Amino acid sequence: MEVIGTVKGEPIQRDSCDLEYIQLDIIEDLIRSIEQEETHPAARIEVDLTNPDDPSYHLSGCNRAFEERFYQLLRERQTV
């Protein structure tokens, strides 16, 4: 599953030393824990980091069960 980071609608380019967008790494780790629930090969998640303190997420091609689990894990992560 692909995770795409954007700022103001434009894809961002990252390198291995880029700490500014660590939020993408966190989302990729979260997805690895539940990706077996998504079988659509073209499914992807777009993370809008225009406001890094409050990123928004757009799930494309994901099934309902995956979406529900994804948002559940995000909510749990925010309460920790």
Image (cartoon, grey):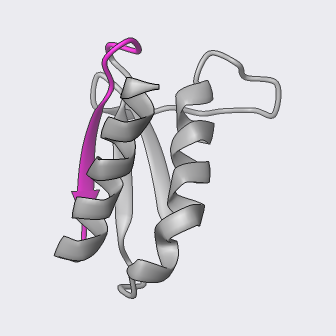
In the drawing, does residue 21 fall left or right of residue 11? right
Q: Is residue 25 above or below residue 41?
A: above
Residue 21 among those drawn in magenta = no
User: In this view, which residue lies farthest toward the right?
Assistant: 17
- Residue 10: horizontal and vertical position, in percent? 36, 32
Which of 78 and 36 lies nearest the eye of the viewer? 78
Place residue 55 in its image quadrant. Answer: top left
Magenta region, residue range: 51-62
Residue positioned 33% across, 17% down in the render: 50
User: In this view, which residue lies farthest toward the left?
Assistant: 64
Which of 68 and 41 lies nearest the eye of the viewer? 68
- Residue 4: horizontal and vertical position, in percent? 45, 47
Q: How many marks?
A: 0
In the drawing, does residue 24 fall left or right of residue 47? right
Residue positioned 48% across, 52% down in the render: 3
- Residue 27: horizontal and vertical position, in percent? 51, 44
Place residue 19 in its image quadrant. Answer: top right
In the drawing, does residue 18 fall left or right of residue 16? left
Q: Is residue 62 visible?
A: no
Q: Is residue 25 visible?
A: yes
Residue 57 among those drawn in magenta = yes
Residue positioned 26% across, 57% down in the render: 59
Q: Is residue 11 above or below residue 73?
A: above
- Residue 29: horizontal and vertical position, in percent? 61, 51
